[in-house]
Amino acid sequence: MRGRLGKCVRVLASLVILEFFLHENIAERAERQYNTLLSEKKKRIQQIAQEEISSEITNHLKYFTEMQKSSHVLQHATYTVLVGAALQPKRLLTVGIFSVQHRNRTYLLDTITSVFQVSSEQDLEYMLILVLLSDTDPRWLNQTVANISGLFMPHIESGRLLVVHGLLGGSKAKSRNHTSPCGKVYSRQKTSFALLMNFARNLSEYFLLLGDNVQSTPRFLSDIFWVLEAWNQVPWVILDFSSMAISGKVFHTEDLSRLISFVLLFPKDISTHLLLSEFRLLLSQNVPIRLNPSLFYRMDSDFEFEDTCFPVEQDKDLGKPDNPAATVFTDMISLWNTNPQYAYILNGDSLWVLDAIKYNYLLVVLDKPQKVIKVAVETGSNENKLNFLKHGQLLLGYSLMDYPKRCAHYNLVGPLVRGQLNQMVFYEEDSVKEISCIKLLVTASHDHPIKISQIKVWTEVEEEEN
């Protein structure tokens, strides 16, 4: 597909080059004679280009037709509201929890309790907790509903908790014999996943996916809200607030229909977390966006294949930042004789700047290219919130140029959230992984002094050979 698009681009480029060449080099007396030929060539090239574009459209239509066919599976889905009111006002965030019967104990009640306990009354006004039960055992269903009703009746009456039972009947999704214990688990998970997201499509602006064994951190909604606000002007598909394979991911609800259709295109025993990565790539988010610290953690589980089937990237203790040697430049006006280097040297000093305007920057040029694995930016002070850099982005650059010292190419890490950034760094496959520049870019003008407290960098240390 990319090859055809490349051919199309090359054909269009040839048209532009041909026009330029003919315009500059054809003599005036031969102009009329060649105009006819030029017109015919242009028509032919345009025809070829149009054929390439039409071919691409046809391929896309074929692909999305298949996705549409798979979405028809959900026409056979049946839902029963077990707890709460089916009609809900549209909220900012739906916290979607899917659950099935487990062999020993379940952590579903603990998961729901955790969400409510760490959320303020104001937080709860902006979110709905949606629980999808997809097991068919009536005894388990009745007991689960009774437990939820007994523990969370105030939240049910206030419209904050909705529990539904969903079944995917008449499934036409591709399936095959399960060759591993994980295959059976993935199959069941994909069904719950699709049913949950299908029900949640119109309930809110954003959707947070959680499993039924998750511990939430205090005021997680507030943290998610500020991240969503900062990323509002930057395209994204999945924001990841956890190291877990599935739980802790936030989506636009407008993407849920496409995501469900995409997931159902594949055999049921294909792992859902791998499909999420492919879906992200399909919509042009080429690397994960992993925010630190994690807002959600997995509870203990009795499932013997948990670590194998649902890998967790442990929040490694990377220790203190190891800012490699570098020179710092800025085009902002510094205050009180503070030096740009103060924002980078790990000694407690800070850089103060005056009235930063859009496209001002602070540029860290590393002495040697480095594999950066994590970056953090701290601006402002607790005493005076006016000193935060409210509108800024952090970029990593490569292909160092000598004069002036800067990088030729940059990749966005992300926008600052309330003047801060703390993010793991991921790289596209086959991309340049040695960074030479770290650029803090001002994206809107500020009419107050800004304190750039610290830029912190963690690099990958090469293991010494024995």
Image (cartoon, rainbow, N blue to C red):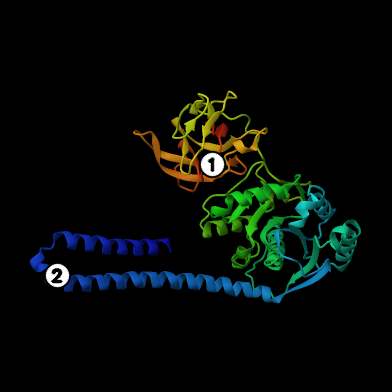
Percent coordinates x, y for residue 296 in the rendering? 72, 47
**Residue at image location 14% in from the left, 60% down from the top:** 25
Camera-side mark, 1 or 2: 1
Percent coordinates x, y for residue 250 in the rendering? 65, 55
Q: Which residue is situated farthest in the front direction here?
A: 447
Graded by Cα atoms within 10 Å as few (under 14), some (14 to 19) or many (20 or more), the crowding at tag 2 reads: some
Residue 244 appears in the rendering: no
Residue 84 appears in the rendering: yes
Against 354, residue 413 (above or below) is: below
Which amino acid lies under the numbered mark 2 shown in the image of this protein?
Tyr
In the displayed structure, does residue 161 sit left or right of residue 244? right
In the displayed structure, does residue 25 sit left or right of residue 195? left
Which amino acid lies under the numbered mark 1 shown in the image of this protein?
His
* Callout count: 2
Check disc 1 and report the residue beneath it.
446
Label 2: which secondary element: helix
Percent coordinates x, y for residue 192 in the rendering? 72, 64
Check disc 2 and report the residue beneath it.
34
Against 405, residue 190 (above or below) is: below
Front one among 52 and 221: 221
